[in-house]
Image (cartoon, rainbow, N blue to C red):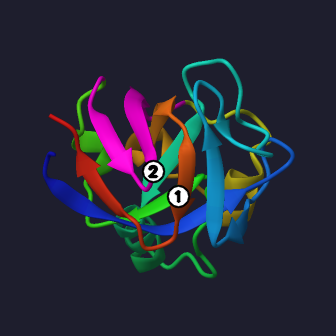
Amino acid sequence: MGKVLGKVSGINISEKKGVVKEPISSGEFIADFGLKGDAHAGKWHRQVSLLAQESIDKMTATGVKGLCSGKFAENITTEGVILHELPVGTRLKIGETVQEVSQIGKECHDGCEIKKTVGQCIMPKEGIFTKVIVGGVIHVGDQIETIN
């Protein structure tokens, strides 16, 4: 296998787009779809969103209060990985799944709940998106590693 980069510190889900996600202890990720039951899942290139706890901590350090896993509508919160430095096309083994980095960052849409609540959003610069290549279950605490 590849190199262990870090671990999953949170898994988050929402039934509607543009809202803060609710934390769950494990999630079922479906190949070429995303997190089962999540509004962002579908047959497109941004099936799963990931954001590093380190990025959230950076926002907290600027004085933003009440930030926690899922506040930025990410499906997977990670620890120990500099996500936005992973090249597009990188394959990651996360829990039972294999996911491929498909996009780094995104534009926030108007009326974004996160931007309204938090003042600014970190997803545009530091969040990443993946496509699910091999489905399976991911638990909080699972390792994240690269696949050679």
Dividing the picture into quadrants, the one containing residue 35 is top right
Q: Is residue 88 magenta?
A: no
Q: Which of 67 and 110 is in front in this view?
A: 67
Whether residue 70 appears in this view of the structure is no
For label 2, the SS is loop
Query: Is the residue under label 2 in contact with that under label 1 (CB below 8 Å)?
Result: yes
Secondary structure mainly formed by the magenta segment:
strand
Q: Position of residue 143 (x, y in %)?
A: 33, 63
Which numbered dot is residue 96?
2
Image depth: mark 1 or mark 2 in front: 2
Residue 42 relative to residue 137: left or right: right
Q: Which of marks 1 and 2 is nearer the N terminus?
A: 2
Which residue does the numbered mark 1 point to in the structure image?
Answer: 138
Residue 142, compared with residue 88, is above or below; it is below
> Residue at horizontal 25%, vertical 52%?
145
Residue sitting at the far right: 16
Amino acid identity at mark 2: Glu
Which region shows up in magenta? 89-106
Q: Which of the numbered marks, if any, corresponds to residue 125?
A: none
Residue 9 horizontal/vertical position (percent)? 46, 71
User: Is label 1 in a helix, a strand or a loop?
Assistant: strand
Relative vertical location of residue 2 with respect to residue 42 in this rendering, above or below: below
Q: Residue at x 48, y 39 (%)?
A: 124
